[in-house]
Image (cartoon, grey):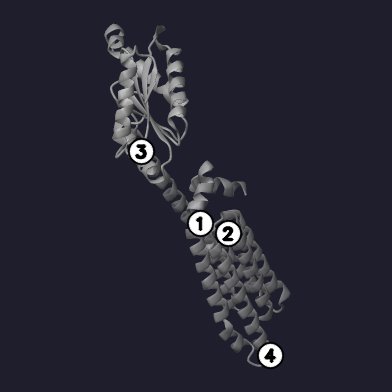
Amino acid sequence: MEMFRKLSSQILIDLRDLEGDYRVFNLQIDKAQGVLGMIIASIGIFGMFWMDKLLFVNSPDLIGWMAIARGCYVLVTVLFIFAIGKTNKVRVFDRLMFGWLAFTILCVLLLNFTSPTSYQSAIFDIIVIFAIYVLSPLKFKKNIFLVLGFSAGTLYINYFVKAGLDPIALNAAVSAQVIVHVLGLGSALQMQSYRRKSFKAYIEEKDAKEMVAYLANIDPLTKSLTRRHFFSIAESEFMRFARYRRPLSVLVLDADRFKIINDTHGHHAGDIVLRSLSLVAMEQKRAQDTFGRLGGEEFGLILPETALAQAKVVADRIQTMWEQTPSNMDGMLIHSTVSIGVAEARADDKTFDDVLRRADIMMYKAKDLGRNRVMTE
């Protein structure tokens, strides 16, 4: 088992934390593959009824019982197919597949008791082993457990329970089963390796696209949303307000005397101040709020489900926290303040720009009254 573990680890990609996502991602494919295997097995087992007529031509009662047994197998398989079609859980699917495979193996072994050993039955046993390796979507451990149990059962029934067989036939059957185990396991490893590589490539491509989209929507300096993305979300929030008339408030923030900071300490200091202001504001907002850079030293904050009085509380908290949080540039503390305007969406507002314009007016009013304060409508 240790050698097999090392071999499989070299061939199969270890998905680690993505293992669960991999199984969920491939669940529909596994279900289709499992159902296909069930249909093929049902056709194969029931289709062998013509062999029963040849083998038991002198026992019509036995032929009848064999027909009933094969029909019952098909009926039970149909029930398994129906149950698999209804489930969307990996664990339930695995249990159903394992149960059906175990049931199929048991039925094949019981049928082997009734038929004489021949090369045709040995070929059928080999096909069953290879089919489980290739078609079963279960984990390798479960598949190996099932096929080894089936191999042991068929060899015991055909060459130990039934008498009068040549030892050469036993050796040939054992050799054939060893070969089919090796071929089946190798094929299964290659198929699983391909599927895992494809899934990993898909996840890496998906993560790369999400990262590109994230970087395109994030202002590189302040780590807030870009103006374009901010307004995209703002339009959606305003449409929701217009439809359901739920409260919606907007804050416009502008760093006070920012030009003096740039002229006195340099543009690098200005960048640090803007980044720090953005961080303080984002720490005070909720997960459902939207914070973005409107341009220069001006920022916007959208507060869904928030009335004017509640929005002022948020604005006061940001203004107070920023006043008490100096920016650190190489050990030098740079103090700054912020002016904030607050507005709430009204029934007569036609677009989001109407709300933003009023909040912007309130922000300039705060500056006119001495800066470092919050003004509401």
Q: Amino acid at mark 2?
A: Phe
Which residue is disc 2 drawn over? 93
The numbered mark at residue 27 is 1
Disc 4/disc 3 C-alpha distance (Å) = 76 Å
Query: As drawn, is 239 to the left or to the right of 142?
Result: left
Amino acid carrying mark 4 in the image: Asp
The amino acid type, in three-letter code, at marker 1 is: Leu
- The answer to whether the residues at label 1 and label 2 have Cβ atoms under 8 Å apart is yes
Q: Which residue is mark 3?
A: 233
Residue at x-position 51% and y-position 52%: 24
Mark 2 vs mark 3, CA separation in Å: 40 Å
**Residue 71, horizontal then vertical, whole percent:** 61, 80
From this view, report whether residue 325 is shown above or below residue 238.
Answer: above
Q: Earlier in the sequence, mark 2 or mark 3?
A: 2
Mark closest to the chain's N terminus, 3 or 1: 1
Marked residue nearer the N-terminal end (4 or 3): 4
Q: Nearer the viewer, mark 3 or mark 1?
A: 3
Task: Tell me the mark number nearer the camera, choosing from 4 and 3.
Answer: 3
Mark closest to the chain's N terminus, 4 or 1: 1
Q: Determine the secondary structure under disc 4.
A: helix
Kindly identify the amino acid type of the residue bearing the numbered disc 3: Ile
SS category of the residue bearing label 3: helix
Viewport quadrant of the C terminus: top left
Question: Would you say 156 lies left or right of 208 here?
Answer: right
